[in-house]
Amino acid sequence: MTGVDISEDQFGLARERVGDKVELVLADASELPFPDGTFDAVLSALTHTDVDAFEGLLGEAARVLRKGARLVYVGLHPCFIGPHSRFVSAEGVPALHAGYRERRRYREAPGISPEGLRAKVGAVHIPLGELVQAFLDTGFQLERFAEVGERLYPPIIALQARR
């Protein structure tokens, strides 16, 4: 198992948690330091909101996967979580505002708490259709897509695809 993160802080936290059980690499996921076809599987979690060029990340995932290998992606549901939606702790009913179809990086928006993490570090919003299309455009074959959990408005999506 190999873990990759560009954040030195997150890298340090991961090192504390896993010790030497997992190889950890400090790298940009859109420029992975591995040869083509290195891995049997890739898991990407909560990345589409943190990178400006999600397609680049998917392209690298496809490159380092062996032919026929799987990618599993888990992320925030872009319909209910983003600059257009006030959905505190993903509880209750989201209060929707204009801007869902606008793909952009943001720090301030109706759905962002001024005291929250996104106000400090920002995030990227990608509408659901563009997010799913990014996997298809990168050459992945979608096998499964799920809105995770039993909540009326699920805050998490999961996708399984094959190279």
Image (cartoon, helix red, strand yellow):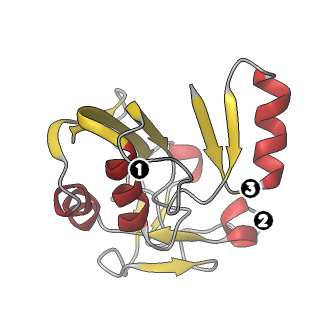
Disc number at residue 24?
Answer: none
The answer to whether marks 2 and 1 mark residues whose Cβ atoms lie closer than 8 Å is: no
- Please name the residue shown 57% across and 53% down the image: 33
CA distance for labels 3 and 2: 21 Å
Where residue 87 sits in the image (x, y, percent)? Answer: 51, 55
Quarter of the image for the C terminus: give it. top left
Above or below residue 82? Residue 25 is: above
Above or below residue 124? Residue 48 is: above
Q: Residues within 10 Å of mark 3 (few under 14, many from 20)?
A: few
Above or below residue 110? Residue 134 is: above
Q: What residue did someone put label 2 on?
A: 115
Where residue 73 sits in the image (x, y, percent)? Answer: 38, 41
Q: State which mark lies toward you, 2 or 1.
A: 2
- Please name the residue shown 64% across and 72% down the image: 122
Q: Nearer the viewer, residue 11 or 131?
A: 11
Q: Is residue 50 found left or right of 5 in the rendered image?
A: left
What amino acid is labelled 3 in the image? Ser
Where residue 28 sits in the image (x, y, percent)? Answer: 60, 60
The answer to whether marks 3 and 1 mark residues whose Cβ atoms lie closer than 8 Å is: no
CA distance for labels 2 and 1: 21 Å
Q: What residue did someone put label 1 on?
A: 93
Q: State which mark lies toward you, 3 or 1.
A: 3
CA distance for labels 3 and 1: 33 Å
Q: What residue did someone put label 3 on?
A: 7
* Label 2 SS: loop
Of callouts 3 and 2, the N-terminal one: 3
Q: Is residue 154 visible?
A: no
